Image (tube, rainbow, N blue to C red):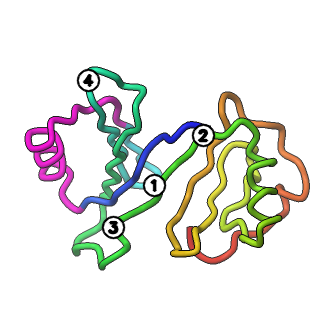
Amino acid sequence: MRYLHTMIRVLDLDAALRFFGDGLGLVELRRRDHEGGRFTLVFLGTEADPDVPQLELTHNWDQQEPYPGGRNFGHVAYEVDDIYAACQRFIDLGYPISRPPRDGRMAFVRSPDQISVELLQRGAALPPREPWTSMPNVGEW
């Protein structure tokens, strides 16, 4: 398992880039604009080692008001060797899967303190399979 990133939502992307770039010294490693979803993802890290955990800034284009407390923090993400086995471990421990890995690639589970944890399949997505493909979302993620 490898820790990947922490996501926060930002109201003003330029101001956030100035804070984390000029202030903290992080550099933009990659950016993705999603026209359909109307959001931009910017991943920041250290130039010296782009493989260390990163900070993901999520800018929702239509957001006009500051995010309420707790809504601006998104999730922590971990890459796992087998997403189905990882999800089954959480179920066996009594934790519901908030967003099942229907695609064989991504799932979300919440900690006892309601922190969203994203699980991402290492490498290519696994072939979709039951019970995951028909499992509904539960709560927020």
- Tell me which segment is drawn in magenta: 11-31
Q: Is residue 129 left or right of residue 41?
A: right
Residue 91 image point, x, y percent:
79, 65
Residue located beneath label 4 in the image: 47
Q: Is residue 27 left or right of residue 35?
A: left
> Under tag 2, what secondary structure?
strand
Instruction: Give whichever of 137, 48 is nearer the camera.
Output: 48
Q: Nearer the viewer, mark 1 or mark 4?
A: 4
Reply above or below: 33 against 99: above
> Under tag 1, what secondary structure?
loop
Residue 40 image point, x, y percent:
35, 47
Q: Which image quarter holds the C terminus?
A: bottom right
Q: Which mark is residue 79?
A: 2
Q: Residues within 10 Å of mark 1 (few under 14, many from 20)?
A: few
Residue type of the residue flagged with mark 4: Glu
Q: Nearer the viewer, mark 1 or mark 3?
A: 3
Residue type of the residue flagged with mark 1: Gly
Residue 59 image point, x, y percent:
31, 55
Q: Nearer the viewer, mark 3 or mark 2?
A: 2
Residue occupying the point 26% across, 32% down: 28
**Which sits earlier in the primary sequence, circle 4 or circle 2?**
4
**Which sits earlier in the primary sequence, circle 1 or circle 4?**
1
Q: Which mark is residue 37?
A: 1
